[in-house]
Amino acid sequence: MNDQSLIESLLPAVNQQLESEQTPYVKAAFTRLVEKEEISPDEAKELIALCLADESNRMYIDKRDFDVSRYQQLLEDLPGELIEDPDQDQDKD
């Protein structure tokens, strides 16, 4: 499974979290990304899906339960380095 298909497979979970009263921090991150960071709603959902994938992967690697606090921190750090900045590559030369 490539990264794009992984993200697409997690979008239903992201949509569910956006509607759930149990995950208001997901809705807050989505709203912040769309309104303050001016990211499209679809891209914002994909960024949230990346965070969900990251935590799910870490859960598997570390053989532990889902860490809600870590997931919340990943969401708070968005957009972070997940969005590629074309100017950033020029600085490395």
Image (cartoon, grey):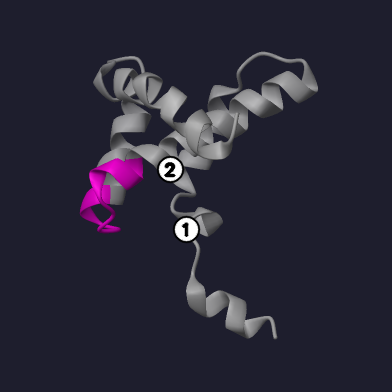
Residues at marks 1 and 2, CA–CA distance in whole angstroms: 8 Å
Q: Could you classify mark 2 by the number of other residues whose Cα lies within 10 Å: few (under 14), some (14-19), or many (20 or more)?
A: many
Magenta-highlighted residues: 34-44
Q: Is residue 93 left or right of residue 42?
A: right
Q: Which mark is residue 83?
A: 1
Q: Give amino acid for label 1.
A: Ile
Q: Which residue lies most toward the right here?
A: 62
Dot 1 and dot 2 residues touching (CB under 8 Å) = yes
**Corner quadrant of residue 13:** top left
| Residue at the disc numbered 2 | 47
Q: Earlier in the sequence, mark 1 or mark 2?
A: 2
- The spot of residue 40 in percent (x, y) is 25, 50
Place of residue 62 in the rendered image (x, y in percent of width and height, measured from the top left): 78, 22
Mark number displayed over residue 42: none
Q: Amino acid at mark 2?
A: Leu
Question: Residue at point 25% right, 43% down?
Answer: 41
Can see residue 72?
no
